[in-house]
Amino acid sequence: MTNHTIYIADSRLMPEVHDESVHLVITSPPYWQLKDYDDIRQIGFYDTYEEYINNLNLVWKECHRVLKEGCRLCINIGDQFARAAYYGRYKVIPIRTEIIKFCESAGFDYMGAIIWQKVTTCNTTGGASIMGSFPYPRNGILKID
């Protein structure tokens, strides 16, 4: 019989988890400046963007340490919609690109993305019908006719 252990802890440092002892990591990291978890150790809410990315990079580094060779890290994260109050203008920040870049430098191989068409990110009051979560055209080609 196989035993599984779930740790609910700060993933930036996981001394209780042995090197190369994990077969799969699935995570949905907190979004930057979006939700206050009322925890002084939280990632994202009070951080600058640079601090946020650096904290996430500590998590990815630990994930690489604990994962067995050839096993997977699955990250659920979307684009960040930055408030005009913070940046002076509204903009989209593709956080996944920062994550991919660091994870590859840490030794992971990028295996592609699964695009989640998340209905709750659609603008129902007008304007764009899809915001951030959308299917890419197959092979990057969209045939219109």
Image (cartoon, rainbow, N blue to C red):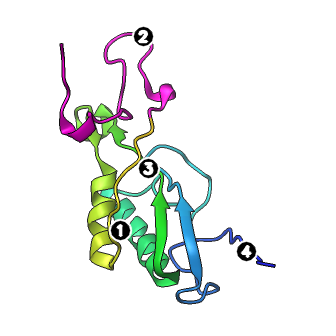
Q: Determine whether the residue tagged by mark 4 lies in a helix, strand or loop.
A: loop
For discs 1 and 3, the disc positioned in front in the rendered view:
3
- How busy is the neighbourhood of tag 4: few (under 14 within 10 Å), some, or many (20 plus)? few
Q: Pick out the residue farthest to the right.
A: 1
Q: Are marks 4 and 3 in contact (CB under 8 Å)?
A: no
Q: Does the segment drawn in magenta span residue 133?
A: yes
Labels 4 and 3: the sequence-earlier one: 4
Q: Amino acid at mark 3?
A: Ile
Q: Determine whether the residue tagged by mark 2 lies in a helix, strand or loop.
A: loop
Q: Nearer the viewer, residue 99 or 37?
A: 99
Q: CA distance from mark 3 to mark 2?
A: 24 Å
Q: Amino acid at mark 4?
A: Thr
Which stretch is magenta?
A: 117-145
Q: Residue at x 33, y 61 (%)?
A: 99
Q: CA distance from mark 1 to mark 3?
A: 16 Å
Q: Pick out the residue farthest to the bottom.
A: 19
Q: Quadrant of residue 98?
A: bottom left
**Where is residue 7 drawn, in percent x and y?**
68, 72
Q: Are marks 2 and 1 in contact (CB under 8 Å)?
A: no
Residue at the spot of label 4: 5
Q: Residue at x 41, y 68 (%)?
A: 55
Mark linked to residue 77: 3
Mark linked to residue 54: 1
Q: Amino acid at mark 2?
A: Thr
Labels 3 and 2: the sequence-earlier one: 3
Q: CA distance from mark 2 to mark 1?
A: 36 Å
Labels 2 and 1: the sequence-earlier one: 1
Q: Residue at x 18, y 33 (%)?
A: 141
Residue at the spot of label 2: 125
